[in-house]
Amino acid sequence: MDDANQPAKVSWGEPMQRLRAIMRALRDPDTGCPWDIEQDFASIAPYTIEEAHEVADAIDRQDWGDLRAELGDLLLQVVYHAQMAEEAGHFGFDDIARAIGDKMVERHPHVFGTESRDKSADQQTRDWERVKEAERARRGAGGVLDDVALGLPALMRAVKLQKRAARVGFDWPEAGGVLDKIAEESRELVEARDHLPPAKVAEEFGDLLFVMANLARHLDVDPEAALRSANAKFTRRFRAIEAALAAQGRRPQDSTLAEMDALWDAAKAAEKSADP
């Protein structure tokens, strides 16, 4: 875009400075966008979470053009929060960048300090966790689970809680114990469904999901990524059902469950035959 056509109130420079200038203009109480002016940290936080998931989705699809766009959307969220924090006198964008830079240097003494780089990835992970534990101690976070963020997606938070507890020995030694617990929780869910009120059914269902997250951790599976993949597979196969029915001049609501099941099995078989 030609600079002559840009609003005079925005000082354009390098891409990062330009983006920050745009956000300042949007939040200007006299000349900015009414919607942007009305926002606060709480109202923007859901968009921040959504954009992070859209980044993960673009990576799963290996859509690099979309990833570039989604990373821009996520970067905008950081700039948005930084602008609001600066307006409130809390901190600014440069403070954010400086703090994360300092943290990265501190947590990588084998790159920026004198420690040897001759370590395995597992050893570096253990070193990282040791530094984080020291940081938590300095902040006064005494409990093992104290600073596992409440705002994380529930499945992700379950895994983080379990990892933190496992570091102090509160964990099954192998996946077999988790599978036994899944069977136990499944039986309790059936019992709740048959004899207990809805609130207890929801509680038992939550217990089962929590243990499933633990199994994912023991199997070294990212449960969020696994569920995203399962969602994509379901969407793909159901669309195949819709396409097959459309070729017959019909819709899913015009067909029986048995017919749709047969089309599902056909879509599944077609995918398997296409696998290398």
Image (spheres, grey):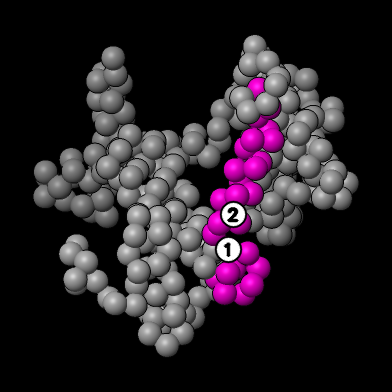
Residue 187 visible = no
Q: Is residue 14 above or below residue 67?
A: below
Magenta range: 84-110
Nearest to the observer: residue 194 or residue 4: 4
Is 106 covered by the magenta stretch? yes
Residue occupying the point 55% across, 32% down: 222
Contact (CB < 8 A) between labels 2 and 1? Answer: yes
Residue 232 occupies quadrant:
top left
Residue 126 occupies quadrant:
top right
> Looking at the rendering, in which quadrant would you find the N terminus?
bottom left
> Looking at the rendering, in which quadrant would you find the C terminus?
top left
The residue labelled by disc 2 is: 96
Q: Is residue 132 left or right of residue 238?
A: right
Picture coordinates of residue 103, whole percent (x, y): 66, 41
Residue occupying the point 64% across, 72% down: 89
Picture coordinates of residue 46, whole percent (x, y): 52, 62
Q: Is residue 41 left or right of residue 131?
A: left
Residue occupying the point 54% across, 59% down: 93
Picture coordinates of residue 167, whole percent (x, y): 79, 29
Nearest to the observer: residue 130 or residue 173: 130
Q: How many marks?
A: 2
What whole-number distance in Å separates the C-alpha atoms at marks 2 and 1? 7 Å
Q: Is residue 255 above or below residue 127?
A: below
Picture coordinates of residue 128, whole percent (x, y): 70, 30
Nearest to the observer: residue 215 or residue 262: 215
What secondary structure is marked by label 1? Answer: loop
Disc ID at residue 92: 1
What secondary structure is marked by label 2? Answer: helix
Nearest to the observer: residue 112 or residue 231: 112
